[in-house]
Image: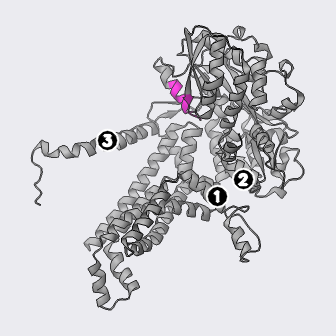
Amino acid sequence: MRREPPRTLADYTPLAFPALMLIVFFVIPFSTMIAVSFFQRNPAGFYTPDFVFDNYARFLSLFFAKVLGFSLMLAVLVAVCCIAIAFPFTYLLTRQSRKMQTVWLVCLLSVLSLSEVIIGFAWQTLFSRTAGITNLLVAMGLMTEAKALTPGFGAVLTGMVYQALPYTILVLYPALVRLDPTLLEAARTLGASPVRAFLNVVLPALRNTIVATLIMVFVFALGSYLLPQMLGRPQHWTLSVLITDQAIYQSNMPFAAAMAVFLVLISLALVGLTLMLGRRENAG
Amino acid sequence: MTGFRNRGISRRTVLGTGLAAAGMLAMPSVLRAQDKSLKVGVYGGYFKDSFDKNIFPEFTKTTGIAVESVAEPTGEAWLVQLEQAAKAGQAPADLSMMSQTSTLKGQSTELWTPIDPAKIKNYDSLLPHFINKYPDGRVAGIGAVAWYITLVTNTDVYKEAPTSWEALWDPANADKLGLLALASNSFLLEVTATTFMGGTKALDTDEGLEKAFAKLAEVKPNVRLWYRDEAQFEQALKSGEIPMGQYYHDVTGLAAADGHPVRSTFPKEGGIQDSGNWALSRASTKVEEAHVFIDYMSQPAIQGLMSRKVGTAPTLKKEVLDLKPEEFAAVSSEIPPIIPRYDLYTTKADWINQKWTELIVS
């Protein structure tokens, strides 16, 4: 099939719908948010349209820098853990029979139907002292006393990885299924062990997919605000938790908007940087 | 009523169920032509459903005013919506249930039509703190519902009930407390001031606030959970996972009555009393009907029934109510309550919020 370059205006019409969606669901809300972030906050009431930098100035402090740093670190860690677990899992899954794959995928999809709240409560119970998994370990004689594993960093990380894992697998699956099996056969014929073939052939062949998935999980995790506050201590609260506090509880929309704009810009910059590095490596 | 509480649905749901029961018993029914109407904002969900089913029909029968109820989102989103609409001359609801802080914030833009005390028969029986006034003395809101936040404990873990808020500071309670996560809903600054600084007047000055923050910082090692969502703490309290904290008196009482090992104690310094007002949007033209509604809701009979069946603290003085001593004790206390310093959350909101967040996060 040969693709003609678009010549007339009519040739561009297929673009109209996506463009409209992008404008309605991204450009307009985001522009509104940017506008609000410059408004003047009135603590006794609401806000008045204005052009002030107070909201950004308040954000530029060591305190918020630390919270932002923690949020980014957490999101990166969640993304890395998800890929580390999901990639080998999905690879092995694609080598199963068709029926087996369907069963697994249906199970994974059903996990997606759980809301964040349910996931949070479930892990809270699993990690509790009174009813949690440590009781099992005590019964097995591996521990002397049941103890609470939540709240803590480990609990937050576990909850968030659990939540993002099905998405990761579903994004990786199509690419891994389409992976040309002859590549592996060639590697094996040339004497590579299965593990070596996986590391030296499968991984590099899918590098772009992996990078794209990393970014998706990173962005997904960055927006999480429920699990960090349910499973973590206050020092594990992400910037999203503080944004929610400002927007919902303090009705300080200008400051919430300024923080959100900052978060979006930082994550866009990180995504851009990742893509740029990837392209350079590919070119070189 | 057992099932839903175990699933940890919020306190408003619990209140709503009781209210439904109260409504059924409340009023004789007299049908009249419904040529007048009123839009009333109430918290969405089960609460609104039970008002719709039981309170509003009875009110309509008694007064001939048809009620259209509007589901209000929680937090201050509703205040923002009312404000924006009023600017355009619209009233998404005539009367709304508003928190004290929201009522004060609305005052700053003259959002509320003043209420005429002469038209509320029981106005003089209202407890003074249930009358929210503009600085010049006009009435901005009248108490709608009130509730207590008290010191709660798991009875399996604490055989003896604590007697003072000082228990929160006790080093023996390390990593055992569940407290509300925000300055403006935990009111812990007020608790600190009342317990250690002789009263909430100590918070008038910045130095007083700094001192309260410093004292409050000592609680941090004892806190296992800073919660925003009630269900999060309630479950942990029942199981003994987090055996002490601050929580709602009424819901704790219901859980105890259900056989859970929990108790609510009014500390000797007093429980924290929070409340919501009925407030009338300035864009509303239903001033007359709104007064009839507030008058109806402020009757001793209705307040007494709500206390019995719902667990809300009455907005009227104890003398005019027909509550038995044990019924009164179930929802309130003779110990003077700690009344939150709502004014601080409008005048110094951002400063307090920033200090508070830094206090607990860092």
Q: Residue at x 38, y 74 (%)?
A: A97
The answer to whether marks 1 and 2 mark residues whose Cβ atoms lie closer than 8 Å is: yes
Q: Nearer the viewer, mark 2 or mark 3?
A: 2
Residue topped by disc 2? B236
Q: Secondary structure at mark 1?
A: helix
Rendering coords of residue B259 (x, y %): 80, 47
Nearest to the observer: residue B324 or residue A239: B324
Rendering coords of residue A134 (x, y %): 69, 68
Mark 3 vs 1, N-terminal side: 3
State which quadrant residue B205 falls in: top right
Mark 2 belongs to which amino acid? Ala
Numbered range of the magenta stretch: B71-83
Residue topped by disc 3? A23
State which quadrant residue B210 falls in: top right
Residue topped by disc 1? A124
Task: Please name the colour scheme applied to the rendered image.
Answer: one colour
Mark 3 belongs to which amino acid? Ile
Q: Secondary structure at mark 2?
A: helix
Q: Secondary structure at mark 3?
A: helix
The answer to whether marks 3 and 1 mark residues whose Cβ atoms lie closer than 8 Å is: no
Q: Is residue A182 magenta?
A: no
Same chain, labels 2 and 3: no
Mark 3: few, some, or many residues within 10 Å (few <14, many ≥20)? some
Q: Which mark is residue A228?
A: none
The Cα atoms of the two marked residues, 2 and 3, are separated by 45 Å
